[in-house]
Image: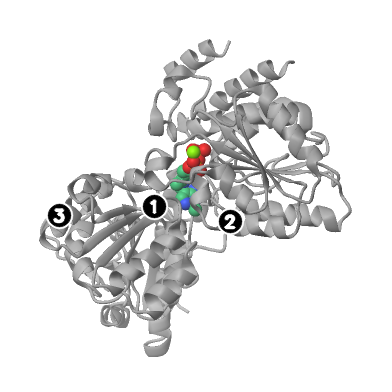
Amino acid sequence: MELRKEYVNELARLMRENDKIVILDADLAGAGGTKPLYKEFPDRCIDVGIAEANMICIAAGLAASGFVPFVHSFVPFVARRALDQIAVSVCYSEQNVRIVGFDPGVHTTSNGGTHMSFEDIATMRAFCNIAVVDIVDGVQLRKALPYITAHKGPMYIRFVRKQTDELFDDSYEFGFGKADKLRDGKDLTLIASGTMLFDAVKAADRLESEGYSVDLLGIATVKPLDEEAVLASARKTRRVLTAENHSIHGGLYGAVTETLSAKLPTLCDAVAVRDKITQVGSLNDLKRDYGLTADDIYARAKQLLTNNG
Amino acid sequence: MTVQQFAKEIRRNTLRCLHSQGSGHVGGSLSIVDALAVLYSRYMHVDPHDPRMADRDKLVLSKGHSGPALYATLAIKGFFPAEWLDTLNKLGTRLPSHVNLNLTPGVDMTAGSLGQGLSCACGLALANRLNGIDRNVYVITGDGELQEGQNWEGAMFAAQKKLDSLIVLVDSNKLQIDGATADVMNVEDICAKFAAFGFDAQRVDGHDYEALDGAIHRAKIAKNGKPQCIVMDTVKGKGVSFYEAMGAGVHSTSVTDEQYEAALNELK
Ligand SMILES: Cc1ncc(C[n+]2csc(CCOP(=O)(O)OP(=O)(O)O)c2C)c(N)n1
Ligand SMILES: [Mg+2]
């Protein structure tokens, strides 16, 4: 199922239970998928028009009055265009606003360079008190939503609207701030967030077919990071590779290496965007061009595995 | 070529460009074609062989998602080969669906994050004044786009600095993505708003070439210390019956082989 369908179905269920949840959109209710909620909850769904900064502050006002607002747009318009509004009215004010960004990083595809953001996790993570969640599939999104609603404090969530790949099945349980341990291994720690987990699984398969054993961690909650899981795995493997659909600066790689450099200096590398300007293209072409494929994970993993430092 | 023929040629090439991807921002591209036809046949002082010529008129397509219409216009004017139109949105293209001044000859400002173009145009007009260049800066904004508050910061600045070389054209097609602009977040009375911000504001039929020509002419010769605004009443998807009939859905929609052929038939 498309993530936007999972999202709206689960949100509708939560809205029936909790009359404090409110929905805000900035002319992308149709595109993002929240439109059906406007019929069932006309008073609690607000389309502010093309005015994202306005939307963030309206949400902050609603939150300050006890509501739990979910605000939506494409990643750059919700997480970048309204940055000072997020800093002051949401984070500094410690308001329960959920900021939802659609189509992170390369998933922007044909909307191109102006809509593509590789810095949202870095900027959000740098603010005080805000949690940051990078979703991989529809099951994870559905399972995370009750928690996202109940969480105290601001939160940023990014996911792909349309993608239909699936990693988790119904038995999956979302743990806020907890890594998902997908494989147990001793040669290499592979840590991936969001949709890079799909590629990480493929790369791990290939490495395992060559006889390596991979400790594979999925990270939905980039902040707060599950430091214990990262440290435990690195202690075992002494080699850590991260994979994220984001800049190498300040995202998952930043979070992991901040932890390791202070507590357990470890050989690390990253599959991430290396200071390369945003652009238009198909998903596969973009992934190849930015070095975000399973092959790239495999190649960097091999380098790490053969680096005797 | 008459302005009518030019406009048809632009529409055909806009759809050629969008058809190469199979879909895209059809509605808002087609609604500005007649304004582009009048501007580029009668007003824009530009040189396809020297697109960065200092002494030129500039156009900021603030509603940057309508790139395909501008690309079609520039291709016909000879800024680049028509074959480029078939590369829309492909990796490494010179024609991304949202305009980018570093990629495309004849594009004067990058846009795609709505609401920034008017401010950028203020900078261009101010630079012209500082450089002693007596040329116009045109901006095309959407009507939904005017919901971004930054437009009004730009408008205030333009009036304060008496930027009378600045001509804002509003593509008032009455639609945005989530529906009718009047239902989502009403922006009317656009003319009165710009007038209240210190502009000379006119309202014309955005598909009537002579009305457009008259309005642009008046704005160009005004030189009265006031920035100029022309609100164009337009139809989203203009020129192709089935696109005109789609309503808000025409914002971003398909251009299949069949649709392309049917559209070309209407644009003979
Ligand atoms: C800052 C920002 N927010 C949202 C979008 C997504 N978006 C692209 S076009 C559009 C609607 C534009 O409506 P309008 O300005 O009326 O343009 P037109 O009808 O001419 O296509 C939106 C919301 C964007 N490009 N930039
Ligand atoms: Mg419009």
**Dot 1 alpha-carbon crowd within 10 angstroms: few under 14, some 14 to 19, many 20 or more:** many
- The mark lying in front, picked from 2 and 3, is 2
Is A296 positioned to the left or the right of A171 in the image?
Answer: right
Q: Earlier in the sequence, mark 1 or mark 3?
A: 1
Question: Which of the labelled discs sits on residue B152, or is there none?
Answer: 2
**Dot 2 alpha-carbon crowd within 10 angstroms: few under 14, some 14 to 19, many 20 or more:** some
Q: Secondary structure at mark 2?
A: helix
Q: Is residue A233 above or below residue B183?
A: below
Residue B259 visible within the image:
yes
Q: Is residue B34 above or below residue B163?
A: above
- The mark lying in front, picked from 1 and 3, is 1
- The mark lying in front, picked from 1 and 2, is 2
Do dots 1 and 3 share one subunit?
yes
Task: Check the residue under mark 2 and report the chain it is in.
Answer: B
- For the residue marked with disc 3, what is the amino acid? Asp
Is B199 positioned to the left or the right of B178 in the image?
Answer: right
- Residue at position x 55%, y 40% in the image: B97
Q: Position of residue B141 (x, y in %)?
A: 58, 43
- For the residue marked with disc 2, what is the amino acid? Trp
Q: CA distance from mark 2 to mark 3?
A: 49 Å
The N terminus of chain B: image quadrant: top right
- Label 3 lies in ligand 1 vicinity (Cβ under 8 Å): no
Residues A140 and B69: in front is B69
Pointer 1 residue: A103
Pointer 3 residue: A169
For residue B10, what is the image quadrant? top right
Q: Secondary structure at mark 1?
A: loop
Q: Position of residue A216 (x, y in %)?
A: 27, 67
